Amino acid sequence: MTTFFQPTIQSLAGELFDSYDFYKVNSITSCRFTQAEMLQWLQPFKDQHLFGKSVLGTSAEGREIALYSLGDGSAKVMLWSQMHGDEPTATMALMDIFSFFAKNPEHIATRSIREKLKLLIIPMLNPDGAERFTRRTAQMIDMNRDASALATPEAKILKSTHDMYQPEYGFNLHDQEPRYTVGTTQKITAVALLAPAADESRGDNPIRLRAKKVASTLAQVLSLFIPGDLAKWDDTFCPTAFGDNMQKWGASTVLIESGGWREDPEKFFIRKLNCIGLLATLYAIATGEINKADIAIYEQIPFNMKLGCDYIIRNAVLKANSQVAPIRVDVGINFDKRTNTVTGHLDEYATVVEIGDLSSFTALEKEVNANGAELDTNLIKMEYSISRDKVELLLKHM
């Protein structure tokens, strides 16, 4: 019998990080994609018989939702992504994980995970939402608030899959708005974690304590690459959310929220972090190293706060109308893409979201010091949207 050297979690994570370009799925070139594109990425792995595939059912609009299983171990780990159609980062990372296993069949991580674990992966739970790149299902339901009513076919599928396999571990994979910050540090949150509560008391039981060990391991791995850019979600119990209920149903569940990173609009760096964090943590579960994790690492992570804007104009003067005195302000502006109802194109719009003292805020893209210049009140109004071009023109005069 061949004996394999067992690397530490940290050394494995470093190796996975350094070799990432050799195993990632190169055909993923945008974070906006449909189920049809995802199935194309999966096809080579299917041809290699990398995983077993079983159809779980269909979405509200009839798109297939499938479970991909890998490994022969006794410990079952369930991972699901894109229950919100516009949260694709972890789906891309799951494709990279499949690719790692396919290209490195004899790697110690591959062998350990496949021998000790049974991975149960649903890589796009809301294909109708992904088709439109929207949060909700085709029935306009946020399926992450449908864990109790089970009104949608997608929610029924997730619940029945849990009931069928009774996994010991769960990974609830999401994207959060990229403007969250790590507490009051003015650092953008790259990744946020949560070991959700199983009831309103928010107490710890063996299931949640095990989830906190998983979260602590993830935090240790991610901190190697993004020290200070990791946050923790508030653990207020949500009785209709899947993560909270998975914990309640007995699967030690961790929420991973992919946040923001400067100059990474496609979220490819955070995709890389997801891939490496998940692989290293699965390896820790497979080898039993997870049991040595210190939950204090998770407990000490700063909370997520929403103190970020895309652009911030600082030290400007605003005279809101002719009846009031001018005042010195900062202005926070966010950008979002919307379909132009005239052209049908996806255009970018800017919205003023904050006016006042933004000294505790940070900018994801750009900060401009106005040095006392007066703002155009035709453009600076709360919740008022204009084109990005107009904002850039405004900033030229600052």
Image (tube, grey):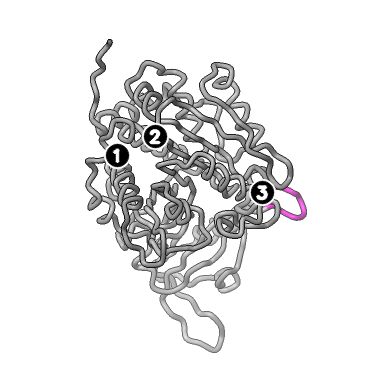
Chain part drawn in magenta: 339-345
Query: Which mark, residue 221?
Result: 1
Task: Find numbered disc 1 in the image and state the secondary structure of the residue it sits on.
Answer: helix
Name the residue carrying label 3: 153
Front-most of 279 and 349?
A: 279
- Magenta span dominant secondary structure: loop
Helix, strand or loop status at disc 2:
strand
Residue on which the image places disc 2: 75
**In this rendering, is residue 220 above or below 354?**
above
Q: Amino acid at mark 2?
A: Ala
Residue 352 percent across, percent down from the top left:
53, 66
Distance, label 2 to label 1, CA atoms, is: 22 Å
Question: Looking at the image, which residue is at 44% across and 62% down?
Answer: 312
Toward the bottom, the furthest residue is 323
State the CA–CA distance, disc 3 to disc 2.
27 Å
In this rendering, the count of numbered labels is 3
Query: Which x, y percent locates residue 192?
Result: 38, 51
Q: Earlier in the sequence, mark 2 or mark 1?
A: 2
